[in-house]
Image: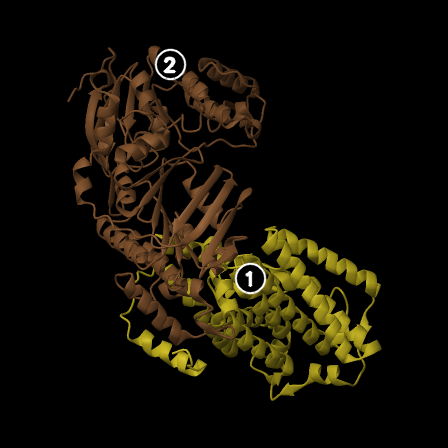
Chain colours: A brown, B yellow
């Protein structure tokens, strides 16, 4: 593996043997990385490969379990303040600006020059103006952020990082929301900053961007570093192969022999914030997968379809026993036999402070009550049966849901819906943050549901999962279906190519 | 299974629960105090009062404590629904109690008791629906909304009553009820007990009560389970309104007079009882029984302070300090539980 940087400067920031776990899951597994002055270093990998976690360790936002970060050879104390003082600036993936404050105030947020506790507004404006000039963006300093376009906000975010005169600038997918022209501008700007000696760590899914501006590339997969190379020594295909790296596993996948039945749900012309006119059909016994990058609009799409969020246009029809029901909103979806396992199980899926039985009762209360009075015996038996059916361990229905591990919590969410015997189930990231064992069990459950004739719509950023589960995969990009893959044409490369929107490998 | 009766259901649940292994939990002392403290403190307070405070254990005094506790207690057990739903409190109970009291006396003087009760019920429903729709449907902040409806309610009441005091007749059912006792226990306290039992059942055993609690624990998960959450919030405010109405009747009957200013401070006192009882201001956690115990604690404490000749100013300070202590324990125990 090539270790030499192509730029001549000294190493500014170095991370050695970083390990970071979240609960049982290892997010970053023994990763080392070094970046030199004037170098643009790409960190690439699939969703969940550990890129953002690694960057948050470098920026001192989270503390690593082991390993160390060195800046100019000196070990860095953890904590965001220390990282900032050491000259590390992180431009977040999610915009973190205050919409109701001005451009200048946002740029200096948190470290505005003050005197006797009062902000020195002249100085503030001067620093903000300088930062904007540095990145070559002209915007009114006194304009409120809420009035700016998403792209301009992204640039203000970068100006904010640059205003601190960092030695190391970290950008986490800065181009995700930008148009090609804006992206082009941003890339040129980064090259200019690097040419003045700034060390830049650049995270992106978009391989062509990496090829264009980066000197070196580090590839992460499942939290591990799988490759580090000079960009000039590799190729787009080589990078994608390493990111995906699972060709061998393809043969191990047990695809179901799908025999789709009647159409269960038809969505036509769905529009919503982040969703741009999507048509979709799911049949009985079929698992339809939605692939794509984080932020592509998959969650927004499924929520708009089932009415969990309002849609601005479109029509959703649910078919049952030959009858069509037009779904008017979320409650009507649920009444018509739809189940929704949301992306955020801790906030949206479960009432964590309530028991397993309570959580199951929440969706099944009509069946578990008589004239509005809850039947405790029936609740106990019903919940116990479901807990055992989904393999909850231990199956103690009086225990608070919050006391269970992530995988078990997800089983509770599935259990609470199974009690309704849904004929259409939406699963959004069903195994995110779930350990391997529980993941396999959840996959088995989902397949069994489909085999029983349930129509399944699954959103997943976990490519192997998507390929294993889905009979048909719609790849979503910019709120639209960028392509549909089924059978043998669906593999990690074809999905990634469609998701990233670049023709970089042969499909 | 489908045809089982309620009693069978409850027995089944108990036998089932007994078969389960005890859930292992690491409860900190703070959590223990937040959980059980009020029962111990109330018992200790009553015991200490009987032993150390002259005049506390007399029949006259006990009856007086009951009389004073009843209307606030009835408001508090109702308002427990709003607090558990995570919507903080209903300040407008001040206006609701007074409105109900004035309507009961004034309308029954002119048109008889049944019509007066019906009018009071209409007023209560209006309060409950206005508060509930604003908070539940339009997602307005409960504190601001109910502060506003307090002003609207009291304003309307003063406009229609002309600010005058209404006196009930010296005989009749209202008067009889107001002065009536069962042994040492005034009827008003029996009403409080009945309200506690009924609302306790509603909160702990019915679908509606379950949804109020689950909404308080996690609004989003409750909504995404297919619940009409606006209806749940409206229901919680309606329960509060009906309780406040009953409290107004009890208060009016006891004094046989009604005036718009008669329920001043009921908002804060009811909240004090709820919080001291251990119902969490963060929603989701608590019970109607706890509120009853909280009412007893606050009422006995106030009575003891009065008997000991401590001035009203100090009483107020004591109540304020009590609430600060209770919410602090609540917040800290929540933090401890999260770890």
Of all chains, the one bearing label 2 is A
Vertical position of residue B173 compared to residue A370: above or below:
below
Residue visible at 59% across and 83% down? B58
Vertical position of residue A224 compared to residue A166: above or below:
below
Q: Nearer the viewer, residue A36 or B24?
A: A36
> Looking at the image, can residue B264 be seen?
no
Q: Mark 1 highlights which residue?
A: B232
Relative to B66, is A241 on the left or the right?
left
Q: Nearer the viewer, residue A339 or B197?
A: A339
Q: Quadrant of residue A191?
A: top left
Relative to B169, is B336 on the left or the right?
left
Task: Have a look at marks 1 and 2 and say if they share a chain.
Answer: no
Which image quadrant: the N terminus of chain A? top left
Q: Are marks 1 and 2 in contact (CB under 8 Å)?
A: no
Q: Quadrant of residue A27?
A: top left
Image location (x, y in percent) of residue A30: 19, 34
Q: Residue furthest bottom?
A: B183
Dot 1: what SS?
helix
Q: How far is mark 1 from mark 2, CA to CA?
A: 56 Å
Q: Mark 2 highlights which residue?
A: A193
Select label 1 or label 2 by which is in front.
1
Q: Nearer the viewer, residue B57 or B6?
A: B6
Q: Quadrant of residue A164?
A: top left
Image location (x, y in percent) of residue A461: 33, 40
Vertical position of residue A380 compared to residue B226: above or below:
below
Image location (x, y in percent) of residue B290: 49, 69
Relative to A97, is B180 on the left or the right?
right
> Looking at the image, can residue A271 be seen?
yes
């Amino acid at each position: 593996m090539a270790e030499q940087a192509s730029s001549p400067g000294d190493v500014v920031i170095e991370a050695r043997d970083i390990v970071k776990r979240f609960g049982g899951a290892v997010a970053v597994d023994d990763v080392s990385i070094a970046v030199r002055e004037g170098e643009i270093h790409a960190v690439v990998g699939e969703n969940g490969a550990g890129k953002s976690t690694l960057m948050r360790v470098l920026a001192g936002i989270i503390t690593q379990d082991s390993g160390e970060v060195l800046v100019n050879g000196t070990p860095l104390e953890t904590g965001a303040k220390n990282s900032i003082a050491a000259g590390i600036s992180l431009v977040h993936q999610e915009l973190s600006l205050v919409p109701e404050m001005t451009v200048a105030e946002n740029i200096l947020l948190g470290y505005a020059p003050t005197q006797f506790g009062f902000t020195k507004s002249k100085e503030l404006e001067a620093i903000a103006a300088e930062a904007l000039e540095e990145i070559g963006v002209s915007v009114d300093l006194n304009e409120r952020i809420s009035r700016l376009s998403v792209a301009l906000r992204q640039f203000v975010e970068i100006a904010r990082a640059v205003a601190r005169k960092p030695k190391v600038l970290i950008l986490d997918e800065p181009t995700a929301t930008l148009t090609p022209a804006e992206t082009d501008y941003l890339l040129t700007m980064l090259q200019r900053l690097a040419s003045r000696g700034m060390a830049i760590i650049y995270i992106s899914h978009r391989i062509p961007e990496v090829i264009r501006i980066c000197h070196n590339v580090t590839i992460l997969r499942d939290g591990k570093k799988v490759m580090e190379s000079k960009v000039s020594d590799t190729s787009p295909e080589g990078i994608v192969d390493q990111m995906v790296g699972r060709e061998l596993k393809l043969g191990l996948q047990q695809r179901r022999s799908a025999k789709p039945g009647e159409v269960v749900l038809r969505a036509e012309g769905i529009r919503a914030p982040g969703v741009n006119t999507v048509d979709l059909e799911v049949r009985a016994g079929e698992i339809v997968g939605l692939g794509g990058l984080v932020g592509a609009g998959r969650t927004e799409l499924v929520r708009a379809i089932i009415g969990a969020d309002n849609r601005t246009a479109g029509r959703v029809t649910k078919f049952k026993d030959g009858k069509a029901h037009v779904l008017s909103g979320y409650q009507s979806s649920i009444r018509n036999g739809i189940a929704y396992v949301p992306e955020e199980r801790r906030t949206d899926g479960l009432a964590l402070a309530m028991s397993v039985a309570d959580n199951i009762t929440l969706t099944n209360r009509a069946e578990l009550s008589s004239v509005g009075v809850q039947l405790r015996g029936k609740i106990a038996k019903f919940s116990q049966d479901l807990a055992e059916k989904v393999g909850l361990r231990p199956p103690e229905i009086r225990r608070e849901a919050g006391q269970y591990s992530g995988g078990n919590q997800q089983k509770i969410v599935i259990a609470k819906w199974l009690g309704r015997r849904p004929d259409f189930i939406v699963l959004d990231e069903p195994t995110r943050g779930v350990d391997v064992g529980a993941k396999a069990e959840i996959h088995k459950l989902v397949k069994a549901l489909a085999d029983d004739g349930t129509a399944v719509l699954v959103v997943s950023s976990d490519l192997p999962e998507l390929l294993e589960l889905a009979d048909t995969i719609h790849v979503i990009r910019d709120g639209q279906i960028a392509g549909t893959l089924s059978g043998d044409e669906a593999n990690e490369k074809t999905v990634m190519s469609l998701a990233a929107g670049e023709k970089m490998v042969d499909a | 299974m489908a045809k089982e009766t309620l009693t069978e259901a409850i027995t089944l649940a108990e036998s089932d629960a007994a078969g389960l292994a005890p859930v292992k939990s690491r409860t900190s002392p703070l959590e223990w105090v937040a959980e059980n403290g009020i029962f111990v403190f109330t018992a200790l307070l009553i015991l200490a009062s009987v032993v150390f405070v002259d005049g506390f254990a007399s029949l006259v005094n006990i009856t007086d404590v009951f009389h004073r506790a009843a209307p606030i207690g009835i408001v508090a057990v109702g308002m427990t629904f709003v607090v558990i739903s995570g919507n903080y409190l209903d300040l407008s109970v001040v206006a609701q109690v007074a409105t109900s009291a004035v309507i009961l006396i004034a309308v029954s003087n002119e048109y008889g008791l049944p019509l007066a009760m019906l009018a009071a019920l209409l007023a209560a429903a209006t309060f409950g629906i206005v508060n509930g729709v604003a908070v539940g449907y339009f997602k307005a902040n409960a504190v601001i909304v109910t502060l506003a409806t307090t002003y609207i309610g009291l304003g309307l009441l003063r406009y229609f009553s002309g600010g005058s005091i209404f006196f009930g007749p010296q005989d009749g059912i209202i008067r009889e009820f107001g002065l009536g006792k069962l042994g040492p226990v005034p009827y008003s306290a029996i009403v409080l007990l009945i309200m506690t039992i009924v609302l306790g059942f509603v909160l702990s055993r019915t679908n509606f009560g379950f949804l109020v609690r689950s909404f308080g624990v996690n609004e989003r998960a409750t909504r995404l389970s297919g619940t009409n959450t606006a209806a749940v919030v409206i229901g919680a405010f309606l329960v509060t309104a009906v309780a406040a109405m009953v409290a107004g009747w009890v208060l009016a009957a006891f004094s046989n007079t009604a005036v718009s200013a008669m329920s001043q401070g009921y908002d804060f006192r009811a909240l004090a009882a709820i919080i001291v009882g251990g119902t969490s201001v963060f929603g989701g956690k608590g019970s109607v029984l706890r509120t009853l115990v909280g009412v007893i604690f606050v009422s006995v404490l106030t009575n003891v302070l009065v008997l000991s000749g401590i001035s009203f100013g100090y009483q107020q300070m004591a109540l304020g300090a009590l609430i600060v202590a209770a919410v602090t324990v609540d917040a800290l125990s929540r933090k401890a539980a999260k770890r």
